[in-house]
Image: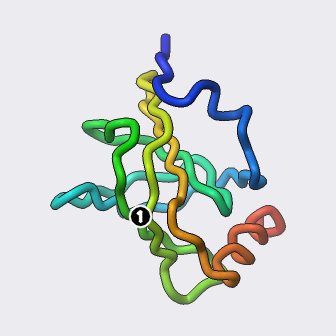
Amino acid sequence: MSTIQGAGDPSERRDNQRFEVAVVVRVYMGDRAVDWPSEDISAGGMRLTVDGEAPKIGEHLKVSFKLPLLAAPIEAEGEVRWVDRGTPTLCGIQFSTGLRAREVWAINRLHTRR
């Protein structure tokens, strides 16, 4: 049984369309960096599978990840909005820095790539 902690049901408050895409996301938490796979990505944030210790709700972190349509990685700051301690452990990151227009474009084009 999973336990979701955080700001209620995360699926109920979406401003941006989510795209199921698995990319490796480098997550910087304080002085450590870990690589976690994404479950889905939107222009407003992402859902990650946590390997190891889960971040705390409200924790601020940085993420870096590559998308097929961009040469440079996307780098953004975000806040942990929820943690689901099921199997696997998942967490939701809301971006707190605005993405560049080309980054939003690349995310929104994910649904057309197979």
Give the residue displayed 68% in from the left and 51% down from the top: 20
Outermost residue on the top side: it is 1
Image location (x, y in percent) of residue 77:
43, 64
| Picture quarter with the C terminus | bottom right
Outermost residue on the right side: it is 112
Give the residue displayed 33% in from the left and 37% down from the top: 56
87 displayed left or right of 104: left
- Dot 1: element: strand
Q: Amino acid at mark 1?
A: Val
Give the residue displayed 78% in from the left and 71% down from the top: 109
Is 58 situated above or below 32?
above
Image location (x, y in percent) of residue 59:
34, 46
Q: Number of labelled discs?
A: 1
For label 1, the residue is 63
State the image quarter where residue 55 is shown: top left
State the image quarter where residue 88 is shown: top left
59 displayed left or right of 111: left
Outermost residue on the left side: it is 31
Q: Nearer the viewer, residue 30 or 54?
A: 30
Image location (x, y in percent) of residue 44:
64, 58
Image location (x, y in percent) of residue 60:
36, 53
Give the residue displayed 46% in from the left and 24% down from the top: 5
Is 25 situated above or below 109?
above
Identify the colour scheme used.
rainbow
Q: Residues within 10 Å of mark 1 (few under 14, many from 20)?
A: many
